[in-house]
Image: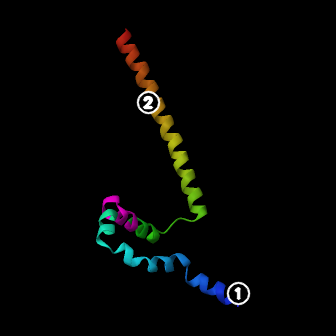
Amino acid sequence: MIGKGLSWLAHHPPLKQIGHAFRWFFRLKPIRFIGRILGFGYLASSWRELRKVTWPTWKESRRLTGAVIIFSVIFGALIAAVDYGLDKLFKEILLK
């Protein structure tokens, strides 16, 4: 008996049932107007788009994060070197 209940719960989430029960409320014009003002449509469409995203695996995430960190350190060092060189150059030109 419990197994059937758990199986039903796995295939019919309670929140989905609650959402169907309140569908009439959210179709009322004043509620829809307030939802448009607050941007609920935008949030709902954003959520639908996020569900379509193919998320990277943990291994891919670590690899890509490492690549970003290495690139950032190298680029930061390059910018620091150019800044140091230009600082010395302009001090020589302007202070001479």
Query: Is 65 above or below relative to 89?
Result: below
Q: Element under label 2?
A: helix
Q: Nearer the viewer, mark 2 or mark 1?
A: 1
Check disc 1 and report the residue beneath it: 2
What secondary structure predominates along the stretch shown in magenta? Answer: helix
Residue 26: name its quadrant.
Answer: bottom left
Secondary structure beneath disc 1? helix
Q: Which residues are magenta?
A: 36-45
Residue type at tag 1: Ile
Q: CA distance from mark 2 to mark 1?
A: 70 Å
Disc 2 target residue: 82
Magenta highlight on residue 37? yes
- Using the image as rendered, state which of residue 52 and residue 4 is in the foreground: 4
Q: Measuring 69% from the left and 88% from the top, which residue is drawn there? A: 3
Residue 65 placed where, x, y %?
55, 53
Q: Kindly identify the residue that appears in the image at 58 percent across and 57 percent down.
A: 63
Closest to the observer: 9 or 72? 9
Q: Which of the marked residues, 2 or 1, is nearer the chain's N terminus? A: 1
> Height in image: 77 above or below 59?
above
